[in-house]
Amino acid sequence: MPASTVGFEAKMDHASLLKKVIEAIKDLLGDCTWDCTNTGMSLQSMDSSHVALVNVMMKSEGFARYKCERNLNMGISLASMAKVLKCAGQEDNVIIKTDGDSSTVTFVFGNDDGDRTAEFELKLMNIDVEHLGIPETDYDCIIKMPSGEFKRLCGDLSQFGDSVAISCTKGEVRFEAQGDIGTGHIRLSKKGSADKPDEEISIELEQPVSLTFALKYLNNFAKATPLSATVRLCMSNNHPLCVEYPMPEVGHIRYYLAPKIEEEAD
Amino acid sequence: MPASTVGFEAKMDHASLLKKVIEAIKDLLGDCTWDCTNTGMSLQSMDSSHVALVNVMMKSEGFARYKCERNLNMGISLASMAKVLKCAGQEDNVIIKTDGDSSTVTFVFGNDDGDRTAEFELKLMNIDVEHLGIPETDYDCIIKMPSGEFKRLCGDLSQFGDSVAISCTKGEVRFEAQGDIGTGHIRLSKKGSADKPDEEISIELEQPVSLTFALKYLNNFAKATPLSATVRLCMSNNHPLCVEYPMPEVGHIRYYLAPKIEEEAD
Amino acid sequence: MPASTVGFEAKMDHASLLKKVIEAIKDLLGDCTWDCTNTGMSLQSMDSSHVALVNVMMKSEGFARYKCERNLNMGISLASMAKVLKCAGQEDNVIIKTDGDSSTVTFVFGNDDGDRTAEFELKLMNIDVEHLGIPETDYDCIIKMPSGEFKRLCGDLSQFGDSVAISCTKGEVRFEAQGDIGTGHIRLSKKGSADKPDEEISIELEQPVSLTFALKYLNNFAKATPLSATVRLCMSNNHPLCVEYPMPEVGHIRYYLAPKIEEEAD
């Protein structure tokens, strides 16, 4: 069976990075398919309720070693992958490998000591892949802010309502939620990056936007917070929001979510 | 509507203090009424089972800014107020404001940076106020001890029984609980305040007391521990216990609880 | 009643040690009997499902003070004993005492300050004692490893299956589990003790062994991890495994578990 020589093998110096990627998407997606090509490992999938879209890109340059002899799809349970990654030590590196025809993928954790290796084989699955194109859009408004701030305000406003109205003008962005007990408003002003670049709040504005989103999804997206100090919210009126967590030198996670109609901007 | 100019506005430098006050009372009280006058904000209410009485006093001098143009009652859900205060940052200050005729109260959190403001409006409620006088009493015995010690011993003894018998003589105070698995006794001796005033244990005794209380309530009172390094237990035979947590320069929280009859002191 | 002068009294400088002992066994055993003699306090009991055997030895030399005037059996609920030990302060010492004819045992916690003493009396129970001899065995293989590593690998492999196959050769020991989602293998190599003796992995091998055990029990044994930096696994083909946590200068906890038949080594 000469095909079995066709293989995929990739090594990451920090298994913890892969662990954070999986933690950021496993609650939204159930089983999913990783596309492995010689440019990298990527994933694109609707969440299980078919409302949000998740896109992960880990470029081949982001790996310590990367070999992909033939394009392949790895159908995998993210819950199982999360179990495997729980077994990685804090300092461990990870090798991911599979043959083109194999029904399993292997994760090998190790570190410089070499006294301990842990190897886990997961069964691969056949998953129907619906390939979803994401049209490139010129956004009306791009907000960059600390990812921790975004996580915090989504959590805070969730106490007041199910939806958040985001409205952005040149100098500030406002988030508002309302419900039975009252209303909450959070206002962030532009803020320079002088000494603390990770605390920068920047707003690139073509035209003012005002859109409403389900907080349940935004809270889920915020699980990517440990991956990145900053987050970018890209918005256009009547278009899906894109929430991007960049992974410097590696790639990104992007989440897409359509605005709520009843609150749609004029 | 000229009445709307009548207003209440108070600023506290540390929203975290107000948060601790609410955490200390919200499980005992449900909805309650804050009395705002030009001497301060206060609250007096029976717990929802009508067994314990809670009294909170925050004096106007304890605020960074305080303006109350007309006495008013703010009926509010403490659960909702706790949700709002969860949204305060560690370093945030808080402004509480309402118009005399308004149906809402507004909490504004901010800090020196000024790049972020968060504003929350809660609906006010009409609550039947039963005004309860607390007769001033000369107590037979006043014990001052570290609040953490009181919390710990109530928690420890709760493992052995539902009630604690407190008996105090000139030199020491004893706490005893008993139940199916056995008995527990904790004895604290007087202790000077020489180098560590917060660890002082002092006993002012007019006459020995011996009283029994339900631990369930004492454990609830101990939720005020983060507010104050020390607690005062004021007791007289056949009278309610007063557990006081002083908030230096601000005011106090006092809890009152009647002793259990079957174990009443002679 | 002159018999009441016959007594048992033992003082330990660190109540925290006794607490860790109880935490290590209370979930496996329910009520049990401590045997007190002039050589020490010990306990031997099957777990409540009658699968594993637990043996605890605390030698009289391990106590700060130890007096046992007559052999006695203390039947006690470990759950109650754990409740008592929760009441010990971090720095407290503990005195355990009972009369030969008493129906209670008393635990007294104190510390150098002496301002606080806490005393707890537990009711003793009559428990049918089945005395189980543990035959001395010459083991084919004794593995010494960091106790934290053993705890971690049992926990990790529990995600993959209910059983772990342990196989040991001269240079390394392998742990393997498999189940529905895939398989996990962890391999540890021998490792010197040069600078970090607690990280040593040593293997004494008379002949290779390969045995399978229920992870549920091993995870329970690993609750003794806080007691000891190292653990010893003593194995012979077709014999029960002995997992020993030494308590230096005090004694040990040993757990015994029969291998699973279906996977029995040849």
Image (cartoon, coloured by chain):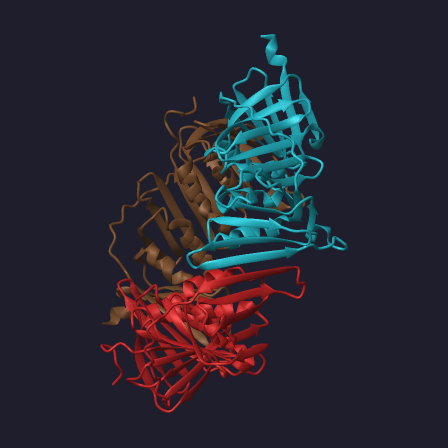
Chain colours: A cyan, B red, C brown
Residue at the far top in the pictured view: A1
Mark yes or no: residue C222 visible.
yes
Q: Is residue B255 left or right of residue A62?
A: left
Q: Is residue B259 above or below residue A1?
A: below
Residue B7 percent across, percent down from the top left: 51, 76
In the shown orientation, is residue C188 left or right of residue A50? right
Can residue C248 be seen in the rendering of this structure? no
- Determine the image quadrant of residue A92: top right
Q: Nearer the viewer, residue C107 or A145?
A: A145
Give coordinates of residue B59: x percent, y percent: 51, 81
Depth check, front residue: A189 or A40: A189
Q: Is residue A163 left or right of residue C193?
A: left
User: Quick check: C69 above or below A241?
Assistant: below
Quarter containing the C terminus of chain A: top right
Where C29 falls versus C142 (above or below)? below
Task: Residue A137: give x, y in percent of width and height.
Answer: 65, 34
At x 40% / y 25%, what residue is drawn?
Answer: C264
